[in-house]
């Protein structure tokens, strides 16, 4: 995966592309975004690798969990 899409707000504006290196550089820092893994459940369960610091959310339930996204930090999906 070379890039991940991100959006700093819950609005559905056009996403920015964030390089993996840029994301990795923020790990452990106060500016690190909330990372959400939205792979399908079967793919997530079958994979032995996780995205560092990511939280898994069901991609079919976006309407249910987007309202709980923080407004004070960037979000990478």
Image: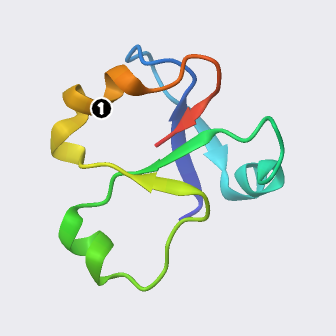
Left or right: residue 37 versus residue 3 is: left
The x and y percentages for residue 13 are 43, 15
Left or right: residue 7 versus residue 18 is: left
The x and y percentages for residue 56 are 38, 55
Camera-nearest residue between 6 and 61: 61
Local crowd at mark 1 within 10 Å, few (<14), some, or many (≥20)? few
Q: Residue at x 59, y 61 (%)?
A: 2
Camera-nearest residue between 11 and 57: 57
Q: Quadrant of residue 21?
A: bottom right
The x and y percentages for residue 70 are 53, 24
The residue where tag 1 is placed is 65
Indicate the colouring scheme: rainbow
Q: Residue at x 28, y 83 (%)?
A: 46
Count of all numbered marks drawn on residues in the image: 1
Left or right: residue 73 versus residue 47 is: right
Camera-nearest residue between 13 and 64: 64
The x and y percentages for residue 63 are 21, 26
């Amino acid at each position: 995966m070379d890039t991940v899409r991100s959006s700093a707000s819950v609005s559905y504006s056009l996403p920015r592309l964030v390089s993996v290196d840029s994301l990795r550089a923020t790990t452990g820092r106060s500016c690190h975004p909330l990372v959400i893994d939205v792979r399908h459940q079967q793919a997530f369960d079958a994979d032995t690798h996780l995205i560092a610091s990511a939280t898994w959310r069901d991609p079919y339930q976006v309407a249910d969990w987007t309202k709980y996204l923080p407004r004070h930090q960037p979000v990478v999906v």
